[in-house]
Amino acid sequence: MKEKFDTLSTEQDSNIRNKQEQEKQKLISKYIEKHILKPFDDGEISEDVKKYIQRAEKMYTNLSPTEKASKLYEILVTRAGKQFENRKRSSRSNIEKQVGAEIEIDAKTTPTINYRYLSKLQALWNNEEVKNLFLEKYSQARVDTKTFKESLIGEEWQNINQQIEEVKKEHQKLSQDIFLKKIKDPEELRDAKEEATFLAQELIQLRQSREDIISLKDLPHIRENTDLAAMIQFEKMKIYRDQLKEGFVWLPSREEIHRDIIASLQNGRWPVLIGEGGTGKSEQADAAAKELTGFDTSKTDLACDKNTNIRDLIADKEVEDNKSYESYGPAMQAATGYESSLQEKPSYYSGRILRLEESGRLGTRAYSVIKKLRQLKQGQLLNGKKVLPGFASIWTTNPVGYRYPDRYEIDPAMRREISEIGVDYPEMSQENPELYEFMLTALMDEKYHNQVTQKELIPAYEEITIKNGKIFKNEKDEPISQVTAEQKIIENPTNKKHGTIYRLSYAIKSVQDSFVAGNKQNISDNILRYTIDDDENIKIVEEGGEALTLSSSTITLGEIASWMKGFQERKQKADADFQVETLTEWIQYKLNTYLKQVDEEDRAKIKAIFEHFHLFDKVPNIENQKPLTPLEIGYLSPRVPRPLILKKIKDENEDETGKPKKEKPDEIKRPKVEKLKVTEVMLENGEAVNIEDYSFEFEKNNEKIEVSKSTQFELDGKTYLFVGQVDQENSEYHKQLVVKVKGDEVCQIMEREGIERGENFYNIEIIKKIFEQEGKLENFYGAENLTEVWGYSEEQLEQWGIPNIEAPKWLLEKAIKMGATLSLKPSLTPNGKSLSILKQDELMAEEYKKAGGGILLYDKKTNWKMESNFYTIDNPNVTIENEEKNQAKIQKKTSQAILYWSLDFPPLGLGETGGKYMSSNKNYLEQTEIMIKFLEDLYKKENQNLPKIYQEAIKDFEKNKPKMEDVESNDENIWKPVAKKLVNLKITKLLRTTPSAILFDIISSRIKTKKDHPYLESNYVFTISRSSSGSLLDFGIADSDGVNSNVWKPRNSDVNLFSPFSLQL
């Protein structure tokens, strides 16, 4: 991600945002009153309805304005149907419908009016303070969401998540197939393992990229960027909330444990998960089992003790209907798929995971069986049944120590067969605040709304002054603001400025750490320490004192989740203790209840921890607190960087109030405007309008930019093409500017200011200027080359249609520096005939000679050439197979009027493409591999994703390329089909070119520069064509004796025979 500073941080854009929010408030208010509360306006309200309203008013009397606004939000939003995000630019009425759709109740599902629901809504809506508070926060939330979804960072986040899910799914499927030994063929297995390794590395990179986005790596911490990071954090917490419904939240530390378990099983070791109660060992074991085998361990788990033996694990005798049979234990079932000896066939045909719970209790009798199980291989017999592929075991246990006298160390003989994996409670630190984020997640309702006030939740920050801070500039390189301070979190987690929940998360982590330490001989230096005063009160101290350990008391994630859920549901309970107003009061109630229930030995210590974190202090005043928006919920996490404090630098062009100074009428500079022809386009709302060609100029970064038809630019992560201006007086969009997203035929209205915010503007003229700036204008061959050199008329080119250049700007700039040529190539002559080699000779031989080129074609009447399509029929854009005899088909292909842009790099190995890309002395197949390497490196070095068309072509090459022994063959029954296969590969058609196209460049270069071709005077390049006899063709040696072509077998190579690299744009 490149560094980006947008004017959103300026006062002007802050005003724009406020205006957007105000507009949103009006539309929401209008829709609620006009559509949802309409039944109350349709006639006289009945007495029953009046009672409903009065009851609702009483129901909410004791709620604060914040709670009432939250209730209003809940009534409107949580009853909504599917929300949809319609990003198209539309009329006010369309926007109003969109807002309404976000909160409307589907009429089809509510055929009768629900007056109870409407009465509650009306009672809350009647309160002006509540209504205004709701409209303020809800409109903020909608604008935040829209900004995030339409931002470059937001789009990148969504894309990376999608890629991660796709790669993860593919990797898991492949890993499962390997683990269950579904891939039998050794060569296929090797390939599968290589691919799994590649996918694993790709997952690691994608996950790191995802973390880099939320941490804003390499991006300035201005509000525009930190807001996006906060919205990403909110999206993460939504995922956590969905997972919580399933009973287990995949926090980062849980993901890491999961990867360790999977790696252990894949390496042939049985993992032993060691951790205290409530750390999630069983859930982790089940998740790993399901990923590798497709099944959890619900039917193959065993609770162990010192008496566990072969009957528990393998089989035990049972009697049914006077018949004796064996009932198989979980180990036998997991290994063989049989549940009893009565079965003739197994219940499943791949192994499962045996989970041994409390494996630390196992005695010698169990180990004697387990050792034999560990040695079993696929196909061997266990109790007379074949062992299935994929059988393995995961053990879970509490740690050995004082607390668990009946847990024992693992049998020494088994140690090399297992891997111990610690499963601790979630982490809690500024860098990885998992426990705190879990609490925030548990406080969300099913619609991801948090009813708690910000003051009770958020960690506290302090401003640190920065002297001579960084100065940010606008697009004109003018200073607009300077960093004066940054926000740093207060490091001491006991500081009273921190919200209750933030301090609670550290307190609970301290309880958990002390509980873990209570079972160890060696105690960590990180746990709290305490002293006892003269009154026998325990006090936490920073230095000295005794390590605070707990014998039997902890707080698990399950308990925390129940506390948070209880707060949401507290008002439903007919218990006076539950009717508290704030989360702090609720937490104090739950902590006191907890203290009454813990062992007396631990009670005073735990209370001291709670007091150390000020959890029993006075309840904060939350009177003026407002409901939280998604953005504010995201900002709660310390992972999200805080925005830098900026001071606006006064602009000399502004008056004392900060507004732009007014210019006198004669001083105002009018933009250059040109009107051209009119066409018709379709807008997003389905309206067809006439468009006139239109152009304008503006300055950006001290550079004059002209925007005209087909000018390409980037804005908010999308690539746009400028279309023109609406020329239709009966349309509300008359005289407005029109653009379209690249690749989309539907157009949209865009303000000029929006266009000018764009980046990377380019069109043909801008590209030409880049060639000129690099001193390589001789490498640019545009429309002028066709009209002035080749004799085409401007009308003819306009009729054929000069295409847009589809390549990204960075690629063009890179290619230009490497000496590439950009040329507009035609498929037909000015008279409409296929522009073959012979036609080019007929048209341009004399001009070529006058420019000092000598003879154009060497030995042009040679029989084999005259019999080959490459010479007589093929044009720069089309090559016809020599086997093609259908004249009508040939005529159709070669008579299409096509103009296309061709970006031709120097032959690989010459000029700037030298070094590791040397393609001389390489056969056709080897050259193709070098071309692919050059292509991949070209994009990789610029941190760009290789376009899908090239990715697919490379996959096609790997799948269909001929074997090297066939390439090296001298047997024409082998090498001729190989030659045909090589030229027909997708990658060949994308990166190589026709002899006719090469001749077109040689002629254009000679006439324009009056010099020999820089690379092909004494060299050849392999082409995409074949001779009539089926041989491969080269083309080149543009000396005074004439350009020549030779035939080659696939095995051939030469010191002067290079690979071209041509991209059709």
Image: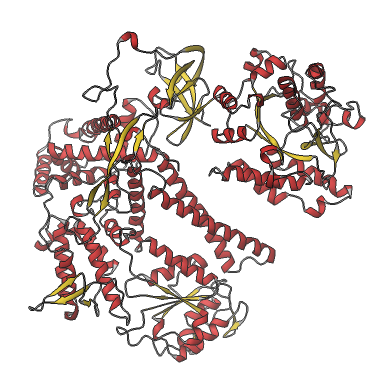
Q: Which of 801 and 824 is in front in this view?
A: 824
In the displayed orientation, state which residue is furthest to the top: 666
In the displayed orientation, state which residue is furthest to the front: 468
Q: In this view, does 205 lie above or below 88?
A: below
Q: Is residue 176 above or below residue 811?
A: below
Residue 86 image offset from top left, x and y in percent:
38, 35
The reply to whether residue 443 is visible in this rendering is: yes
- Residue in the picture at 56% in, 71% down: 350
Residue 918 image offset from top left, x and y in percent:
72, 45
Q: Is residue 42 left or right of residue 77?
A: left
Q: Is residue 601 left or right of residue 861?
A: left
Q: In which quarter of the image is residue 696?
A: top left
Q: Is residue 144 above or below residue 858?
A: below
Residue 662 image offset from top left, x and y in percent:
27, 16
Q: Which of 731 and 1027 is in front in this view?
A: 1027
In the displayed orientation, state which residue is furthest to the right: 863
Q: In which quarter of the image is the N terminus?
A: top left
Q: Is residue 105 left or right of residue 891?
A: left
Residue 898 image offset from top left, x and y in percent:
68, 24
- Residue in the picture at 29% in, 56% down: 441
